[in-house]
Image (cartoon, rainbow, N blue to C red):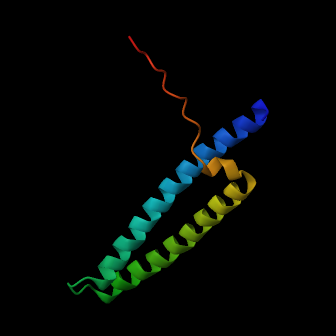
Amino acid sequence: MSAAEESDIAQARVFLALLNSEIDELSERIESALRLVRGTRPVAPELASAARTDAAALRKDLHRVHALVEQLTRRFPTANVPAEVPAAHSFRS
């Protein structure tokens, strides 16, 4: 593998990590909005409507990020595999 290919894969791994963090954050925000709507305490209809709208917009963002992950892993299949960790050296006395 060339140095350029290794660099591309390394960048893809970094980007995948960022995208996965974004997926986690968007998922939490969607869950939070839906908890507000489905909560046991009644909320104002306007607040519930705004939370539903926010959740829908966040879902669209989430789908876009998932699509980016899919495209990136299709382009760089090995980027989804953790980088090789150098073998530990044995120091025997």
Q: Is residue 70 above or below residue 82?
A: below
Of residues 22 and 2, the one nearer the viewer is 2
Which quadrant of the view contains residue 48?
bottom left
Residue drawn at (37%, 75%) of the image: 33
Estimate the x, y position of residue 45 in percent, counting from the top left: 32, 89
Estimate the x, y position of residue 26 in percent, counting from the top left: 46, 64
Which quadrant of the view contains residue 64?
bottom right
Q: Residue furthest front?
A: 93
Residue drawn at (72%, 58%) of the image: 74
Of residues 15 and 91, the one nearer the viewer is 91
Q: Is residue 89 above or below residue 2?
A: above
Q: Residue furthest left?
A: 41
Q: Residue furthest top?
A: 93
Estimate the x, y position of residue 41 in percent, counting from the top left: 20, 84
Q: Is residue 76 above or below residue 28?
A: above
Locate the C terminus and report the quarter of the image it occupies. top left
- Please state if 66 lies on the left or on the right of 91 as rendered: right
Of residues 27 and 83, the one nearer the viewer is 83
Estimate the x, y position of residue 32 in percent, counting from the top left: 34, 71
Which quadrant of the view contains residue 29?
bottom left
Residue drawn at (78%, 35%) of the image: 1
User: How many numbered marks appear?
Assistant: 0
- Please state if 31 lies on the left or on the right of 2 as rendered: left
Residue drawn at (26%, 84%) of the image: 43
- Please state if 63 lies on the left or on the right of 28 as rendered: right
